[in-house]
Each structure stands twice: as C-alpha cells, then as structure tokens.
Amino acid sequence: MPGKDYYKILGVSTSATPEEIKKAYRKLALKYHPDHNKGNTSAEAAFKDLNEAYAVLRDPEKRKQYDMFGAEGFQSRFTQEDIFKGFDLGSIFREFGFGGSGRGQNPFSQMYGNMGGFGRAGTGGFQGHGQGAKGQNLVYELPMTLEELSNVTNKTIAYQVDGRQERVSVKVPPGMKGGQKLRLQGKGQPGLYGGPPGDLYIQIKELEHPIFTRDDADLYVKQKIKFSEAALGAELEVPTIEQKFLKIKIPPGTQDNAKFRLKGYGMPHYKGTGKGNAYVEIHIAVPKKLTNEQKSLVESLKEEGL
C-alpha cells in the first residue's frame, strides 16, 4: 500500500516554510471541516488526511523523519499514535478560530469518533465521543529453560516504554510452552489523548535443552546402552527434569528404540493438574572399533547365531 504524500495533501512544496504549511492547512481545514460538510464522507476522509499531514509536517523532527524515509517508509515505521503524539488539535482549532460545538467536548474525539477512528489493528483506535485511543501493545520475548518452566518462576524484566526504561516483575506459571503469552494489563505504551495504556505481553521463548525434548507435557530422553546390556538386561540411572536420577531396569532382550515410561516425571500441565510423563528412548550403541579380543568374542557370538 503506497504511503500518503503529505506535501501533496496540503498542496505545498517539499521546501515549504512552517508558515506556508500552517496557512495551507488552515485554508483546507476550513474547506473540509465536518461542520461544513454534514454527511459528506469524502470530505471527512480528506479532513482526516489533512490533520495527519499537518501533525507530521508542522513538527520539525517528524518532518525530518518523513523526508528521510519517504512516504511509504515513514508510515511503515510510525503508527498513528506516533504521528499524533503531541498534536493538540483542540489548541490548534482555538488558535484558528474554528472547531467544536462549544459544549466542552474534545474536538479531536468529536471528529474522529463519528468518522470511524483510526489506528493500527491491535492498538485501540478512537472508541467514540470523549475517548482517546488505547496505547500500543508491546511484546517482550522471555527466554526460559525447561527447568524454569517446570516450576513457578519469578522474573524481573526491563523494557522500553515511550523512550524510558521500565522494570516489571512477572510470575510465570508452571507448564507454559514456547510461544504462549502472559498479559500484563496497562503496562504497554501510554494512551493517546487520555486513552488507556496498552498491554504488555510476555511471550515465552523455550530454550533448547541439552538432554530433554518436549512434546506438550511429555519429556523424552535418549539413553545409549551396550549390546550386552540389551541382550542380558541392565539397571540404568536416568536424569529427570527435577535434576534427580532414577534407577530403571532394562529387561533382557530390549530392542533398539524401545521406550520406557516414567509416569508423572514430565512437565506440569499448564492451567491443569498433575504432570505428563517422561520417556526413556533406548539406543543400542555399536562400537566403531574393536580390540582383537572383542573381535574374537563377537566372531564366537556369530558362530552361535547371535
């Protein structure tokens, strides 16, 4: 979608002075003001574009960014909340001598409330008369190990809000998975023109584990054993996510890829009760090199049909 040409909307050149921009805006705002165009949706749309263009070009820093990135680049980087931040439309209307109905309502809300509002999806938008826009939601990616996700874990995070650093403590319930989010209401970007702040979403990033792989609430661990242990049986020690070791018996004749279940030794069920299971996957190790004695023994086994 092409960006809006703010200079063209106001009918000024790219080298226009602040006074020329102000004069052009006043003239067009009078022409397209909703009070003079009742029920004219095209005039309302034009008036919205005028305000957006003026909010950017009257501000030296925003205009600099617009000139630097171009129309499309600017609008891919800046939300409507960014564009209208610090833009006191009520004050501007009073300065120009036109605007609201004189009943004390915010003229910004009056116009945008009945024009459908604006804003990026998920950031709010103007809800109606006398209301501002909800602030933008933020997403913070929180890396966590399986050990941390197997218990209630408290984390303190630092993040940027409106150019300043904020710190917040968050309690991560057990059993959460990568990609799931926790919502901290009101911890996002500030609202616009009296609107409520956005929310902060803590998105879990599940770190790869050196031993376990996870399937929902179940855990899998690979365990190598010797051929002799598979054939004759053995007792193994296997790790658990609780950082303990359990002894399990491998029966004689255990096959490669056999699985043994450790009931209740998996991950907690998120928002549920109990835990999943852990599974020990058996892999029979074949030595790459044999001593002469081992080779002789294997040859004997071969002669015996093994």
Image (cartoon, rainbow, N blue to C red):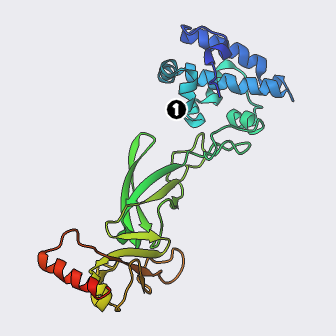
Furthest residue to the front? Answer: 303
> How far across and how far down the image is residue 63, in percent?
52, 20
Q: Is residue 156 visible?
A: yes
Is 213 left or right of 104, judged from the image as shown? left
Residue marked by disc 1: 77
> How far across and how far down the image is residue 15, in percent?
54, 7
Is 235 left or right of 208, judged from the image as shown? left
Q: Residue at x 46, y 78 (%)?
A: 268
Q: Residues within 10 Å of mark 1 (few under 14, many from 20)?
A: few
Q: Is residue 247 visible?
A: no
> How far across and how far down the image is residue 186, in percent?
53, 54
Q: Residue at x 64, y 11 (%)?
A: 23
Amino acid carrying mark 1 in the image: Arg
Q: Residue at x 70, y 43 (%)?
A: 130
Above or below, comparing residue 150 to residue 86 in the picture: below
Is 260 left or right of 31, judged from the image as shown? left
Q: Nearer the viewer, residue 236 or 293?
A: 293
Q: Residue at x 69, y 24 (%)?
A: 49
> How far across and how far down the image is residue 20, in percent?
60, 9
Q: Quadrant of residue 250?
A: bottom left
- Give the position of the C terminus as an image quadrant: bottom left
Label 1: which secondary element: helix
